[in-house]
Image (cartoon, rainbow, N blue to C red):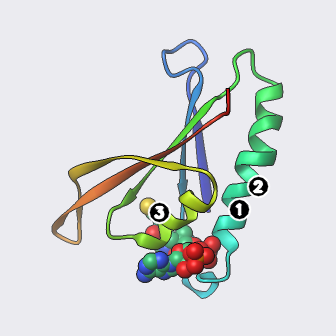
């Protein structure tokens, strides 16, 4: 599953989006999610932008810091690390840091 949220066109986040993803375990490690995120950035986003008054120029994604595979998926798709969100999540009763990565359209 790959979820996208585009900012409200009338809001300050009009040109920003958020990306989240999850893949069934039997498909892990085959390059599936990297391929999906690349298709989103290079093919889906331009199609969506063609129908918007203001193009989305930034897509952010946050991952659990210990989840190196998720971070790698984003890095391989052109997202860059922007910062560590300390104790951002409570997962299985334990506080976990989050990593914020973002893709920004070339200017
Ligand atoms: C994380 C997830 C999306 C990865 O999807 P995937 O299709 O298996 O990922 P890919 O095969 O495209 O690539 C994974 C990359 O991470 C790397 N990787 C995998 N496990 C790793 C680990 N434990 N440590 C470091 N890197 C790891 C792979 O080597 C690969 O990088 P490489 O090509 O440079 O070698 C998938 O495992 C998943 O859905 N996990 C559970 C839900 C989740 O964590 N969602 C994200 C919420 S933040």
- Classify residue 4 by image quadrant: top right
Tell me residue 66's x, y (percent). 32, 70
Mark closest to the chain's N terminus, 3 or 1: 1
Q: Are marks 3 and 2 in contact (CB under 8 Å)?
A: no
Above or below, comparing residue 43 to residue 30 in the picture: above
What residue is rendered at 66% in x and 34% in y?
105
Q: Is residue 24 visible?
A: no
* Label 1 packing within 10 angstroms: few (<14), some (14-19), many (20+): some
Residue 17 is left or right of residue 44, and the answer is: left
Q: Which residue is mark 2?
A: 39
Q: Which residue is mark 3?
A: 71
Mark on residue 36?
Answer: 1
Asked if disc 3 is less than 8 Å from ligand 1, the answer is: yes
Label 3 element class: helix
Viewer-nearest residue: 92 or 73: 73
Task: Measure the C-alpha gap from mark 3 to mark 2.
Answer: 17 Å
Asked if disc 2 is less than 8 Å from ligand 1, the answer is: no
Mark closest to the chain's N terminus, 3 or 2: 2
Label 1 element class: helix
What residue is rendered at 16% in x and 69% in y?
93
- Classify residue 44 by image quadrant: top right
Foreground tag (3 vs 1): 3
Label 2 element class: helix
Q: Are marks 3 and 1 in contact (CB under 8 Å)?
A: no
């Amino acid at each position: 599953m790959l979820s996208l949220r585009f900012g409200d066109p009338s809001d300050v986040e009009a040109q920003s989006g958020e990306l989240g993803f999850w893949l069934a375990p039997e498909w892990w490690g085959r390059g599936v999610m990297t391929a999906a995120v690349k298709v989103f950035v290079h093919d889906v986003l331009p199609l969506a932008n063609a129908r918007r008054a203001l193009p989305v120029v930034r897509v952010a994604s946050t991952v659990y810091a210990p989840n190196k595979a998720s971070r790698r998926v984003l890095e391989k798709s052109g997202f860059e690390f922007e910062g560590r969100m300390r104790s951002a999540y409570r997962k299985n009763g334990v506080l976990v840091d989050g990593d914020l990565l973002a893709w920004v359209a070339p200017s």
